[in-house]
Image (cartoon, rainbow, N blue to C red):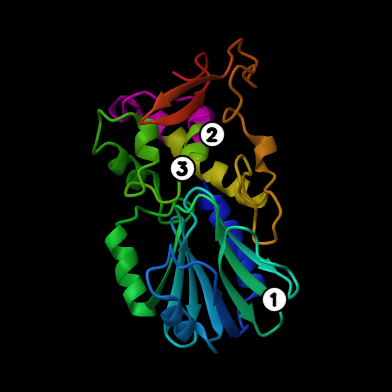
C-alpha cells in the first residue's frame, strides 16, 4: 500500500495541477531516503519545468525540462501532496518542491520505507527496465494469454502470491489481489496450476475491473493513504473482503470472511464461495 490505483490517482492529479509549472526552489528537510545529496537534488531541479508525470507499476515519475527525472516510490506510508504556498511541512516531510504558481509538492513518509531518486531521464528508463516489472494490468496489451502464461510458470505457487509478484503483474498488491480473487471465486491459497481456463479468465477480468473501479474512487484508504490533495480514497466502502474479517460474505452464502497469513501477509477470503 499504496498500490496501482492509489499511485495512478496521484499521477493524474499531479498531471492536472503541476505540469507546466517551474520548480523555483527545492527544500530538503531530510536526505535519509534520497539517492543523492541535498545539493545535487537542488541543482538538478532548480529552474526546471515539469513536463510530464508518469507511472510504472507503483513507481511515480516526474519528468523535467532539463532532461532530469524524479522517481518516487511510496512503499507503505509515502505521500505526495500538492499544497498551497502557506501550508507548513508535516512532521515527516522529507522534500518540498516550490513551484512557480506558489504551490508546493511535498513528499513525506512516516515509516521511511519509500524513496526519492533523481536521474537523467534516459538513466531512469534503464533503472525501470532493471526492475523487471511485469505487464500493466490496465493496458490493452494485458491480455488473458499474457497473464495466464506468467501465472502458470510457477504452477505450485499459491495464486495470491503470484498476483502480488511485481515481475508477473505490475501494481497489484495485497488489497487488490484479495478483492480480485473474491470476484473470481478463487481461494487465494490454491496453487496457480490448479486454476482452469474459466477461472483464469474470470480472474483476469476481476483484476482489470477491480483496478479500474478503484481508480474511479481515487483508491483505497485502508491505511494511511491520501491522494495528492490530501483526501482519502473512497474505494474502501466498496471492498468485498479486505479488512472484513468475521463479517458475513456479501454473496449471502452463509460464509464469514476469514483472515489467514500467506507469505507473511494478511489475506481475506470467503471459505464458502472461494474454492
Q: Earlier in the sequence, mark 1 or mark 3?
A: 1
User: For residue 93, which quarter of the picture?
Assistant: bottom right
| Whole-percent x, y for residue 50 in the image | 55, 81
SS for callout 2: helix
CA gap between label 1 and label 3 equals: 31 Å
| Chain part drawn in magenta | 180-200
Mark 2 = which residue? 179
| Whole-percent x, y for residue 13 in the image | 64, 65
CA gap between label 3 and label 2 equals: 10 Å
The residue mark sitting in front, 2 or 1, is 1
Q: Residue at x 38, y 73 (%)?
A: 36
Q: Residue at x 57, y 19 (%)?
A: 257
Quadrant where the C terminus sits is top left
Mark 3 = which residue? 173
| Whole-percent x, y for residue 126 in the image | 29, 70
Crowd tier of the residue under label 1, counting other residues whose Cα lies within 10 Å: few below 14, some 14–19, many 20 or above: some
Q: Is residue 110 left or right of residue 234?
A: left
| Whole-percent x, y for residue 141 in the image | 40, 56
Q: Is residue 34 left or right of residue 206?
A: left
Amino acid at each position: 500500500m499504496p498500490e496501482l490505483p492509489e499511485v495512478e490517482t496521484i499521477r493524474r492529479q499531479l498531471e492536472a495541477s503541476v505540469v507546466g509549472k517551474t520548480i523555483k526552489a527545492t527544500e530538503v528537510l531530510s536526505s535519509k531516503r534520497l539517492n543523492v545529496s541535498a545539493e545535487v537534488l537542488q541543482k538538478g531541479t532548480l529552474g526546471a519545468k515539469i513536463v510530464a508525470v508518469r507511472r510504472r507499476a507503483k513507481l511515480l515519475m516526474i519528468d523535467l525540462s532539463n532532461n532530469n527525472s524524479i522517481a518516487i516510490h511510496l512503499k507503505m506510508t509515502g505521500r505526495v501532496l500538492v499544497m498551497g504556498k502557506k501550508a507548513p511541512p508535516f512532521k515527516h516531510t522529507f522534500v518540498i518542491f516550490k513551484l512557480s504558481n506558489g504551490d508546493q509538492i511535498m513528499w513525506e513518509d512516516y515509516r521511511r520505507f519509500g524513496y526519492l531518486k533523481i536521474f537523467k531521464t534516459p538513466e531512469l528508463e534503464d533503472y525501470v527496465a532493471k526492475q523487471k516489472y511485469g505487464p500493466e494490468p490496465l493496458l490493452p496489451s494485458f491480455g488473458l494469454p499474457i497473464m495466464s502464461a506468467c501465472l502458470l510458470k510457477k504452477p505450485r505457487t499459491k495464486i495470491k502470491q503470484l498476483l502480488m509478484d511485481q515481475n508477473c503483474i505490475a501494481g497489484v498488491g495485497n488489497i487488490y489481489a484479495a478483492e480480485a480473487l473474491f470476484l473470481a471465486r478463487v481461494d487465494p491459497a490454491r496453487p496457480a496450476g490448479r486454476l482452469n481456463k474459466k477461472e483464469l479468465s474470470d480472474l483476469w477480468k476481476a483484476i482489470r475491473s477491480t483496478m479500474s473501479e478503484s481508480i474511479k474512487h481515487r483508491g483505497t484508504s485502508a491505511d494511511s493513504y491520501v491522494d495528492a490533495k490530501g483526501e482519502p480514497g473512497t474505494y474502501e466502502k466498496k471492498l468485498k473482503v479486505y479488512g472484513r474479517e468475521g463479517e458475513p460474505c456479501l454473496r449471502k452464502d452463509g460464509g464469514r470472511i476469514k483472515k489467514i497469513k500467506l507469505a507473511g501477509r494478511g489475506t481475506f477470503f470467503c471459505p464458502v464461495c472461494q474454492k
